[in-house]
Amino acid sequence: MQSRFHLLMFAAILVSACGEEAPEMVPYDPARDYFSFANTGQFVTEHLALDLTVDFDKQELRGSATHRMRRIDSAATEVVLDTRDLDVTNVRVLLADGSAAAADFRFGETDAVEGSPLIVGLPEDFNSAAELKLELNYTTSPDSTALQWLPADLTAGGEHPLMFSQSQAIHARSWVPLQDTPAVRITYEATIRTPPQLLAVMSANNDPLTARSGEYRFEMPQPIPSYLLAIAVGNIFFAPLGEETGVYAEPELLEASVFEFADTQEMLEQAEGLFGPYQWGRYDLLVLPPSFPYGGMENPRLSFLTPSLLAGDRSLVAVVAHELAHSWSGNLVTNATWRDQWLNEGMTSYLESRLMEVIYDTDRANEERVLSYQELLLNLEVVPAEMQALAPRLDSGDPDDFQGTIHYSKGQLFLQYLEDAFGRDEFDAFISSYFDAFAFQTITTERFLDYLDEYLLQIESSKVGRADVEQWLYEPGLPETVPVPTSATLDAAQAMAAAWADKKVDVAEIPIDSWSPHATVHFINSLPANLSLDRVAELDAVFAFSNTQNAEIGRAWFIQVAELRYEAAYEPLIEYLNRYGRGRLITPVYAALAQNGSDLDRARDVFERARAAYHPITEASIARALGLDND
Ligand code: BES
Ligand code: ZN
C-alpha cells in the first residue's frame, strides 16, 4: 500500500508536469504483488487462529479469524486485509489482559478479480502497539470462489455432502479475511466444527487416528503463504501408505487409492535424498471428487488430488511426484508474487522429472519430458510473445489465467539446461543449497538470479553467463541451446502413427499392448490432421480408445475426435466431459469442439448440461474457450 501510494504520487507529479495522463510511465515493480490490497509494508500477520463452523445446509463457513500481527510502520493506524464476498460482522482488537476493544471497519471499492479491501481502523490506544491481535467475525458466501460445496450425489458414496477449498492463486481471501499474498508467511491453528459423522482435514497436522467427533483441532507450526491454507470436510477415511505417508479418500475410493499411490513413501524418501530434508512432518494425500479442478494441489502435509489419477496402473502418479516436490520448491521456497510462478512450477516440474527417474526409470521420465515439451511447443504457438518469458510483466488480469505450460515446461527445460551445463553433481549441490538458503522464505526471480550468479555462474569452469540466463527469464520463445528431450519409445510410437496413416503397416501390427500409456498418448497425438473418418473408426474398433479408463489417453483421443469431427464417438466424448472435472482434461476437448468449425453450439449445449457439476475455476476456463461470459 505504501509503495502503491508512492507510485501514485509519482504518477500524479508526472500528470501535473505533462498536463496529460501518463499511466505507462509508472514503472513496473517486479517485487510488488499487484493482486493484493494488504498493507504489508505496515503490518504483517505472523499467526492466524481460525474457529469455524462448517454449515452444509447454508453452504457457509461461520466463525472467527484472529490475526496476531507485527507492526512494521510505527505511523500506521489502519490494517487493510483482502476479502471476497465475506460478510464481516464484527472486528475487535484484543488486549494482553484479555479485554477487547471494538474497531471500526469498512470495505473499499470491489474489484472483479481482487475482491474487496477490508479497512480496519485501530482504536487510538493501539496506534503504537508493536504487536496487535485482531479478531474478525465473519461468514463466507455460498459463492466463495475458494470453496466447493458438493451435494451427496456428486461424491463417490452418494450419501454425504463434501466440501473442499482451493486457495491458489488468490482465493484464500474468499474464505478467510487475510493478507492474501505469497509475500507473507503465517503459522496457524484452527478449530473446525462439522456435522458429527464427517471428518475435517487441513494443510496442517492431521492425525490419522483422530476420533470422528465433529470438532477438530489443527496446528500448523511451519509458516506458510496464504495460498496454501486448505480445508476439506466429508465422509473421508484414512489408509496408511508407509511410515510417514497415507491417503484420505471416501471409502469407495480408498482401496484403489492405496494401490495407485503405493509408491508415495518411497517418493518421499528419494526426494529427501535428492533435495534435502523434508521439513513438514507427515506427507499425506487426499483424493477428492471429480470436480476438483486440478490434477493436484500441493497443500502442505496434505496434497489434494483429482480422482482421475486412479488409472489402475500407477501411470499418472507423476502428479504425486510433482505435488510432493512442491514441499521444497514452492512451499519451502516460495514465489514472491504470481509473476514469479515459474520458481514454484518450473522448479517443481524439473524436480518431478528427477524423482520419476529414480522411482521408475529414465525411459519413463524421458517419455514424460517429451510429452510436456510437445505441449509447450503447442502453447508457444498461442501465448502472446510478452507472456512467454519465464518472468513476464504481470500487473493486471486474473492470476488464474496465468497458467498453461510456459512456466512449467520452459522452467523445467531451463533447469535441465543448467544441469547439463554444470553437471548433475554440481547442480544438485546447488539445488540443495538453494533450498537451505531460502527455506521458509519468499523470493523474486531477481533474488534467484543473484543467488544463481553468485554460486554457479561465477565458478571458473562456467560456460553459462548471466545474459544466457536472462534470455530464459525475460525473453519469449526458447533459446537455441534448449535441451530438447528425446524418448526412443515415443519416437517408435510416432513412427508407427505415420506408417499406419500412410498405410505402410496394418492396424494389427501396432504393438499398443507393449507400450506405456504415455506412448499411446503420443501415438494418438501424432495422428495426422487429415485422417479420414473410416480410419479413425478402424483405430477405435481395434483399440477401443473411446472406452479407455485412462484419463490422459481419453484426453488425447477426444481432442482428436473433436478436431477430426468423428461424430460416431461423440457419445463417449460427452460421457468423458461429464465424468471428469479437472480442467486440463476437459477444457481442451471443449476448445477443440468449439474450433472445429461446426460444433460450437453443440459444445455450448453439452457445457450447459454439465456445468453444475464443475468447479467454478474449470467452469470459467471452459466458458472462455466457448466464448461465453461466465456470469
Ligand atoms: N499448484 C499447482 C496448481 C495451481 C497452479 C493452482 C496455479 C492454481 C494456480 C499444482 O501443483 C500443479 O501444478 N498441478 C498440475 C500438476 C501437473 C503439472 C503434474 C495440474 O493440476 O495439472
Ligand atoms: Zn505445481
Image (cartoon, grey):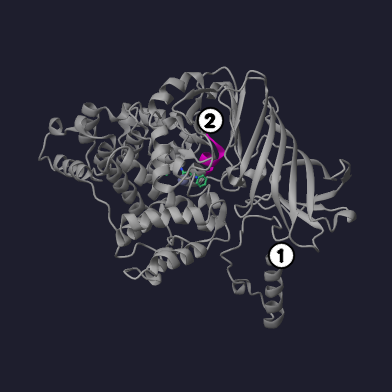
Residue 19 % position (x, y): 69, 80
Question: What range is drawn magenta here?
Answer: 613-620
Indicate the secondary structure of the residue bearing disc 2: helix
Residue 202 versus residue 410 in the image, above or below: above
Q: Which residue is depicted at the point 46% across and 41% down? A: 323
Side of 593 where 224 appears, left or right: right
Instruction: Identify the residue under disc 1.
Output: 2
Residue 258 versus residue 599 in the image, above or below: above
Q: How many marks?
A: 2
- What kind of secondary structure does the magenta stretch mostly adopt? helix
Side of 97 where 312 appears, left or right: left
For the N terminus, the image quarter is: bottom right
Can residue 596 be seen from the camera position used here? no
Q: Identify residue type, mark 2.
A: Ala
For this orientation, the residue located farthest to the bottom is 17
Q: Which residue is depicted at the point 65% across and 47% down? A: 186
Magenta stretch holds residue 325 = no
Q: Nearer the viewer, residue 90 or 74?
A: 74
Report the disc number at residue 268.
Answer: none
Instruction: Identify the residue under disc 2.
Output: 613
Circles 2 and 1, Cβ within 8 Å, touching? The answer is no
Residue 192 % position (x, y): 68, 30
Can residue 270 be seen from the camera position used here? yes
Q: Which residue is depicted at the point 82% across and 58% down? A: 77
Confirm if mark 2 falls within 8 A of ligand 1.
Answer: no
